[in-house]
Amino acid sequence: MEVFEQEQFLPITREQAWEFFSRPRNLEKITPPEMGFEITSCRGEQVYEGQVIAYRVKVAPLVRLPWVSEIKAVVPGESFVDDQIVGPYRIWIHQHSFADAEGGVLVKDLVHWQAPFEPLSWPVKVAFVRPKVAEIFAHRKEVLAAYFAEDGEFRRSS
């Protein structure tokens, strides 16, 4: 099982962070464009326990796969967990959490994942999947840092 962790300080309140991150449609705004991320089904504007969200993602040129996640746990204002039930990974469990910090909020991502066809996929995991996971979250971090201004507003540069 692989583990990916990332923390990011944002100059907004925990409540503002929750408002943004708990809305599934905002995931499109922070996902690398080359992934062709598209939500195909999502009931509700804000995450809730048991919510099922369906997406399509591009994993290679001309290869788009379905990805379906279920929201497994929600602590309003503090955290939520999404669990891939169909998708490109054998396992993908992502905990999003938010903690007050001086002058803003600390946003934490904790992902437990496993590539498909383990252990046979080890070379692909090392050469492609692990770097891609890091790239996705690096993009997310960069976009969030650029988009959240001192006044807590999400701004799109394009």
Image (cartoon, rainbow, N blue to C red):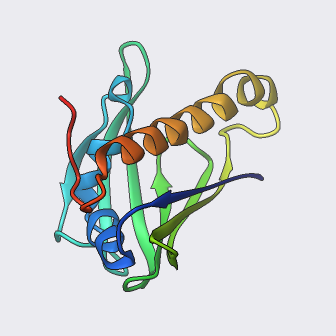
Where is residue 44 shown, x and y percent of the image? 17, 71
**Apparent side of residue 110 relative to residue 55 in the rendered image (left or right):** right
Q: Quadrant of residue 120?
A: top right
Count how many numbered circles sit on residues in the image. 0
Q: Position of residue 77 (x, y in %)?
A: 38, 83
Q: Residue at x 34, y 73 (%)?
A: 18
Q: Nearer the viewer, residue 77 or 50?
A: 77
Q: Residue furthest bottom?
A: 75
Q: Residue 26's x, y, as percent? A: 26, 53
Q: Quadrant of the C terminus?
A: top left
Q: Name the residue: 31% across, 29% down.
A: 36
- In this rendering, the answer to whether 48 lies above or below 66 is below
Please give left or right for residue 134 compared with residue 59 in the image: right
Q: Classify 28 as above or below 157.
A: below
User: Which of the two residues, 149 or 45, is positioned nearer the viewer here?
Assistant: 149
- The residue sitting at the top extreme is 61
Relative to 75, is 134 above or below?
A: above
Query: In the image shown, does 59 or 34 lie closer to the viewer?
Result: 34
| Residue at image coords 24%, 61% | 151
Q: Picture quarter containing residue 147? A: top left
Residue 75: give x, y in percent of width and height: 44, 86
Left or right of 151: which side holds 124? right
